[in-house]
Every structure is written in C-alpha cells, then in structure tokens.
Amino acid sequence: MKPNLLAAATASAVFAVVLFGSPPASAVEKQHHLGVGGQLSILTIDDKSSASVGGGAAAHYAYGINDTFNLMLEGSWAVVAADQQQDTPETPRTRPAGVDHASFGVGYVIDVLQWVPYVCALGGVYRLHGGTLPQDLWLPGVELGVGLDYQLTRSFAVGLAGREHLMLSKIDTYSSYTTVLLRGEYMWGW
C-alpha cells in the first residue's frame, strides 16, 4: 500500500471507531444541565474603529422538556474594554467597559452519539456599564447560538459554543456582540 493510501485508510479506521464505537449520548426528557465556562467577548460599536475585545465568565442551566428541546437559562459577565475611559471631551459616550446579560429561551438538541450539537434562541436583558457611559445602560435583546458538547460520561460534558447577541433597542449603536464559550457541565435526572 502507498504511504498516502495507508494514512488515509488508518485515519478512516480511527474515525469510524470513534464515531461508531462510542455509546450513544441519549438525551432524555427531564434531564438537568448545570454548567460554567470562560468566554471571549467581542462588541462592535458603530462610532469606534475597532471592536472591543475581552473576556469573562458564563453560567447556564437547561432542563430537557423532551429528548429534543431544552428550556435554557444563561447569564454572563464580560469585560470588553478594561481601560476604556473618557480621554477627551470628544470621546463618544457610547463605549462600555463591560457587558453583562441574562437570557431565557429554548434549545434544539441534535443527538448524535457522544457528540451533541445544538442550536438555541433566547431573549433577555443586557447591562452595558463603565467606560465612557454616563450611567448603566439596560437593553432588551435576543441571543442566537450554536454549540457542540462532548459527553465525557453520562453526568459530565465539555463543549464549545458561539452566541450572537442583538441588543434590539440600540442595534444601530451596538450592531454586534459575539461570545465564544468553552464550557463544562454536570447533568442529572435521567
């Protein structure tokens, strides 16, 4: 066998063992999920030449309505511009140092072996604070997300998730708020 063909055959065999040799994840109704994670946060502000990038933490809870749909509750805290301040009188008063949010909604689980992809839509409230803002700014918004969890055991999972947040009443000023999360969770109630 040629080396490239051997490598391809070996990679295919390993992929097949991982994909088909894993026990099913078996999402079930009435299952609880509680997790935490770290996040990368990117806020785009219309009057700023570059995005405000920072990090924070997030927590989530989900409850399995059935084996496909979960009720979800998420919250996060992030510093997007730790050193943002009113440098000059001309500095716009629209640049927060941090963004916090809490949201509630529904997730759709695509149950595939130990790898569990999902999509979600949530509505909630956002608090922009600090920086050049004269006061805290509370905004309604929606959150659209995707994620991929890997179940280490029946009770523990790790995952990667992405969220796009839309702050509806100030979408012209804060056109995009994106978060990427690396998270872990504990599950019970199956």
Image (cartoon, helix red, strand yellow):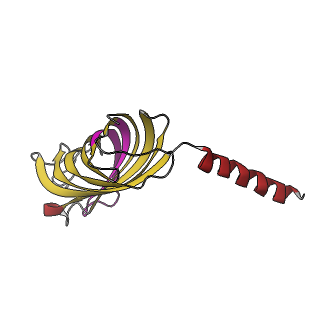
Quadrant in the picture for the N terminus? bottom right
Q: Residue extending furthest bottom?
A: 172
- How many discs mark residues in the rendered view? 0
Asked which quadrant contains residue 21, the reply is top right
- Could you tell me which residue is drawn at 66 percent across and 52 percent down? 16
x and y percentages locating residue 111 in the rendered image: 44, 52
x and y percentages locating residue 99 in the rendered image: 23, 46
In the image, taking residue 141 as reference, residue 180 lies left or right, namely right
Asked which quadrant contains residue 139, the reply is bottom left
In the image, taking residue 129 as reference, residue 18 lies left or right, namely right
In the image, taking residue 160 as reference, residue 121 lies left or right, namely left
Relative to 59, does residue 123 appear above or below in the rendering?
below
- Could you tell me which residue is drawn at 13 percent across and 62 percent down? 169
Quadrant in the picture for the C terminus? top left
x and y percentages locating residue 140 in the rendered image: 13, 56
x and y percentages locating residue 172 in the rendered image: 19, 67
Q: Residue extending furthest right?
A: 1
Magenta stretch containing residue 59, yes or no? yes
Magenta stretch containing residue 136, yes or no? no
Q: Which residues are magenta?
A: 36-62
Helix, strand or loop for the magenta stretch, by majority: strand
- Could you tell me which residue is drawn at 20 percent across and 63 percent down? 173
Q: Residue extending furthest left?
A: 135
Relative to 101, does residue 90 appear above or below in the rendering?
below
Observer able to see residue 182: yes
Observer able to see residue 90: no
